[in-house]
Each structure stands twice: as C-alpha cells, then as structure tokens.
Image: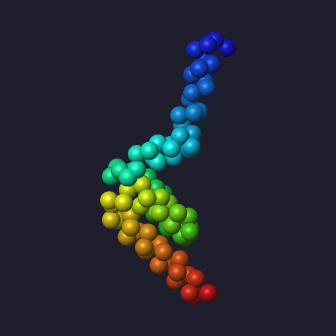
Amino acid sequence: MSKSTRSKAGHSGRYSSPEIRRAREEALRPCSILGYDHETLALYLVERGAYRLAEKELQRAVWLNPFEPRFKKNLEMVQIQINSKIDSR
C-alpha cells in the first residue's frame, strides 16, 4: 500500500465517526442551525412510540440550539406522553 493510499484510508473513517460529529457539535453550540437532525429523528421515534428515545434526541436538540422554540415544545409534548403512560399504569 502506498503512502497516499494509506493516508486516505486512515482518514475516511475518522471524519465520519459519530465521535467527531459530536465533538464538532459541542464546539459549535449554541448555534441556531444545529439540532434539526435530532428533531427529525425524535419525531420519527414519536411516531413509532419510542418516547424515551425521542426525549433524549429532543433534549440534545434543545441543548444544541436553545433558540428554536419548537424543540422545546416538542420536548414538552413528549414528556407529557411519558408522564401520561406512567400515570396510566
């Protein structure tokens, strides 16, 4: 393997890893353009009834972008769903 092939192979996984993505988010926060991907995933999880996972994703979205009120509204709605399920048991 040549030197250039080795360096390209070594870097491709590094830049796409979840750890690097998370570190980049941490460095950029609070930012008005972050959090939308977490909200999209959370809304999908709500449709599937995975409220605890959706809550975690929305908490992350709010933490990354505290300027977006819909993240907070969606988080509150999910927390209400979780509490109502707990109360009904």
38 lies above or below 28: below
Q: In this view, does 24 lie to the left or right of 7?
A: left
Name the residue rendered at 33%, 52% in the picture.
32
Quadrant for the C terminus, please: bottom right
Q: Nearer the viewer, residue 62 or 4?
A: 62
Quadrant for residue 5, please give it: top right
Q: Which of 26 and 1 is in front in this view?
A: 26
Rendering coords of residue 14 (x, y %): 57, 33
Quadrant for the N terminus, please: top right
Extreme right residue here? 1
State the colouring used for the structure image.
Answer: rainbow
Name the residue rendered at 56%, 44% in the picture.
18
Rendering coords of residue 43 (x, y %): 45, 63
Rendering coords of residue 78 (x, y %): 47, 72
Q: In this view, does 87 lie to the left or right of 59?
A: right
Residue 19 seen by the camera: yes
51 lies above or below 68: below
Quadrant for residue 9, please give it: top right
Rendering coords of residue 60 (x, y %): 47, 58
Extreme top residue here? 2
Residue 44 seen by the camera: no
Name the residue rendered at 56%, 29% in the picture.
12
Report the number of numbered marks: 0
Extreme bottom residue here? 88
Name the residue rendered at 47%, 42% in the picture.
24
